[in-house]
């Protein structure tokens, strides 16, 4: 089992709709959870961080964390063509400092 | 500096050669990470520094890979006897995070060094 798992996609969503991205992780002691966006040929950039169970909203983005289910998700409301990118889920496990990334989900917003 | 700076942005070398990749982190960031990313994959952890010391080098694939950060700022990733399988984008990231702190730890990435081994 991979430490951080994501559906690789591609995920296609019409412009203006909600895009839902999911991630599961294996280390129950994990403390910190991040979503990064990566455009083709560019480096990852931080979109959201979440550290406790529940929802965290920032503009059009909402991160959701359920530690009991070992599940993290990212919702993007009112999707725009500029949201088309690969979204990387990253988890910092308990007892260590490294950030472990999933393989990423490629999202395409269809105008 | 304003962001994480990596040089060179592109490096083409021949199999068996030695390569050095440099990372200049955000000023004041004590934590520095090296990752490797192959096409279609997420970043793969290589090594983490807190200050001058390598706090976690569990991701280095073998003894051909080595990294240093002698003054706690700039870091160099060194690859000996390069192989074609080493071809990837090598990403450096820095963070103001202190080890063990909860609720912090955002990594800021540089633009990467694309290594091609022929």
Image (tube, coloured by chain):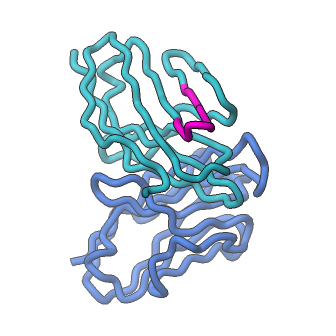
In the image, residue A88 sits, relative to residue B49, either above or below, namely above
**Foreground: A1 or B117?**
A1
Q: Which percent across, then down, holds residue A22?
A: 43, 34
At horizontal 65% and vertical 73% (from top left) the residue drawn is B69
Most distant residue in the front direction: A68
Residue B43 inside the magenta-drawn segment: no
x 48%, y 79%: residue: B78
Residue B9 showing in the rendered view: no
In the figure, the cyan chain has which letter?
Answer: A
Q: Residue at x 59, y 32 (%)?
A: A66
- Tell me the residue at 26%/78% (across/down): B84
Q: Which residues are magenta?
A: A63-71
Residue A78 position within the rendered picture, expressed as x and y whole percent measured from the top left:
39, 11
Indicate the quadrant where residue B41 lies.
Answer: bottom left
Give the quarter of the figure containing the C terminus of chain B.
bottom left
Asked whether residue A67 is drawn in magenta, I would say yes
Decide if residue B57 is on the left or right side of residue B21.
Answer: right
Position of residue B97 measured from the top left corner of the image (x, y, whole percent): 73, 50
For residue B2, which quarter of the picture? top right
Name the one closer to the observer, B88 or B21: B88
Chain B, colour shown: blue
- Asked if B44 appears above or below B116 in the picture, the reply is above
Residue B103 placed where, x, y %?
A: 73, 40
């Amino acid at each position: 089992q991979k430490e951080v798992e994501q559906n690789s996609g591609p995920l296609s969503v019409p412009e203006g709709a909600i895009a839902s991205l999911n991630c599961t992780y294996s280390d129950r002691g994990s403390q910190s959870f991040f979503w990064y966006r990566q455009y083709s040929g560019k480096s990852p950039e931080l979109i959201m961080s979440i550290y406790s169970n529940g929802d965290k909203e920032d503009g059009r983005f909402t991160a959701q964390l359920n530690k009991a289910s070992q599940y993290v998700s990212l919702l993007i409301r009112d999707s725009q063509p500029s949201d088309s990118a690969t979204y990387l889920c990253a988890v910092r496990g308990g007892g260590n400092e490294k950030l472990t990334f999933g393989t990423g989900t490629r999202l395409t917003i269809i105008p | 500096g304003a962001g994480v700076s990596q040089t060179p942005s592109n490096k083409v070398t021949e199999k068996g050669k030695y390569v050095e990749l440099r990372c200049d982190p955000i000023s004041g960031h004590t934590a520095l990470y090296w990752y490797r990313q192959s096409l279609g994959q997420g970043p793969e952890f290589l090594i983490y520094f807190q200050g001058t010391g390598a706090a976690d080098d569990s991701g280095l694939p073998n003894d051909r890979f080595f990294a240093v950060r002698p003054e706690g700022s700039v870091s160099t990733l060194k690859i000996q006897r390069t192989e074609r399988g080493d071809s990837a984008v090598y990403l450096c990231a820095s963070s103001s995070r202190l080890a063990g702190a909860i609720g912090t730890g955002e990594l800021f990435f540089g633009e990467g060094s694309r290594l091609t081994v022929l």
